[in-house]
Amino acid sequence: MKQFPNLESDRLQPLLIVILPQNAAEVRYRVKHWSDFTTGVITQCIREGPLKRANDQYFNNIALKLNARLRGIELRGRFACDDSIEERRTFYHHGILKGADVAHSAPGTTRPSTTSLVWSYDYHASQYNAIVEIQRPKQEILSDLQMMVSKAILGFGMMNKVSPRQIIFFRDGVSEGEFEVVVKEELNAISLAIDVLWTEKNIKDPKPKLTFIIVGKRHHIAFFPTQNSIADDGKGNCPAGFVSNQEDLSHPSTTDFYLQSHGAIQGTSRSGHYTVIRDDIYGFNVNEIQELAFSLCHVYAKATRSVSIPAPVYYADLACARGAFHFSPNSSLNFGSDVASVSSGHQDINLDQWKDAFRTVNKAAGMYFL
């Protein structure tokens, strides 16, 4: 496993292994807030119960997470359109993969929704940083997307000393009923971030090409092989890599397809539904986009096999799930406090008060969300 070469220094990073009792949510909360937001020290929490019955696979999974968080490289993706060595170098040096998601609080509470944008920055597009924010409850549009995209592009430029030539943006968690408003607002925010940044920083390089893809997991379409001999998992599922863009299943006004990129551990595999909203990079060549998505399902840092959705989407989901840790355990405003709960159903909050209590990730924490 190679070490990422563009680190600010070659000094060793501290790493703490924390063994927790079986039920220690509060302790883990405090450990992660201290490590990810206060000090930047990398911590790996391990529960006592699983540790006592751990096998090689368990320790291998722990090692995978630690390697990625220490900026190691486990797997490299290959993108379909980058056939030549020079084209691959161009993409890896000048392209950003992004994943975005919104996570809402549970019904009956007035906690903010958490938004995340993860973006790749290294030569192999395997290392990611995360930008996490909060916004008004139950709002699906990322209200701070322009700012988040600007931060990601600036961060990429500072780390690579070059502006990105292309951006592949995967958006998670959008239902078909929300496509129109989300696409209109968020595409405009991305374009505005690029335009403003190029003007304010007087960037002479061409503006990056943009491909915007919505990835859906919550649908009711399942695929099964017509012959048992085709199924390769003994559970009657189609093999990993099965793709369908049949006209009778596709949306009449968009370019979309279903990709079953993983094998089910148990039960029925559910494919990802990909809707290509804008594509400046591949020119709506569905075969190349399918290869791109399938390749990215194999580079998820916590798994040794392909997963159901591309790695940037998974990472955005994980970053949202860490939203609670951005608040100090000692604060009266945190995602686990009774202050946030309501019984009247009134869905209004003092967002400024929440944002004042919200803490940003320490830069040294790396891929803390794994």
Image (cartoon, helix red, strand yellow):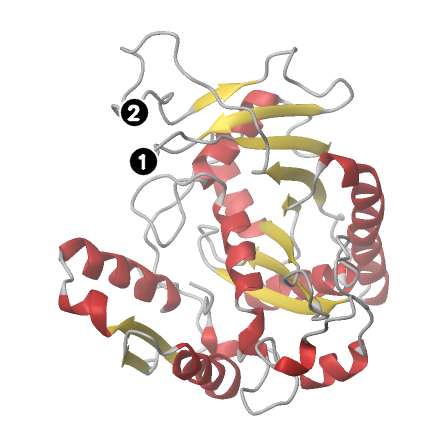
- Mark 2 to mark 1 CA distance (whole Å): 7 Å
* Residue 344, image quadrant: bottom right
Q: Which residue is mark 1?
A: 266
Q: Which mark is residue 61?
A: none
Q: Is residue 225 left or right of residue 246?
A: left
Give residue 103's position: percent from left, percent from top. 63, 58
Residue drawn at the location 71% of the way across and 47% of the way down: 208
The percent coordinates of residue 191 (x first, y second) are 81, 50
Q: What's the residue at 22%, 74% (across, down)?
A: 48
Q: Which mark is residue 235?
A: 2
Of mark 2 and mark 1, the one earlier in the sequence is 2
Looking at the picture, how far across and down is residue 29, in whole percent? 46, 80
Can residue 355 be spotted in the picture?
yes
In this orientation, does residue 279 appear? no
Q: Quadrant of the N terminus?
A: bottom left
Tag 2 near tag 1, CB within 8 Å: yes
Please report the residue visible at 71 percent of the width from the left and 63 percent of the height from the top: 148
> Can you name the residue that lies furthest to the top here?
227
Dot 2 falls on a residue whose secondary structure is loop
At label 1, the amino acid type is: Gln
Name the side, left or right, on which 290 lies relative to 15. right
The C terminus lies in quadrant? bottom left
Q: Is residue 204 left or right of residue 326?
A: right
The answer to whether residue 15 is above or below residue 237 is below
283 relative to 5 in the view: left or right: right
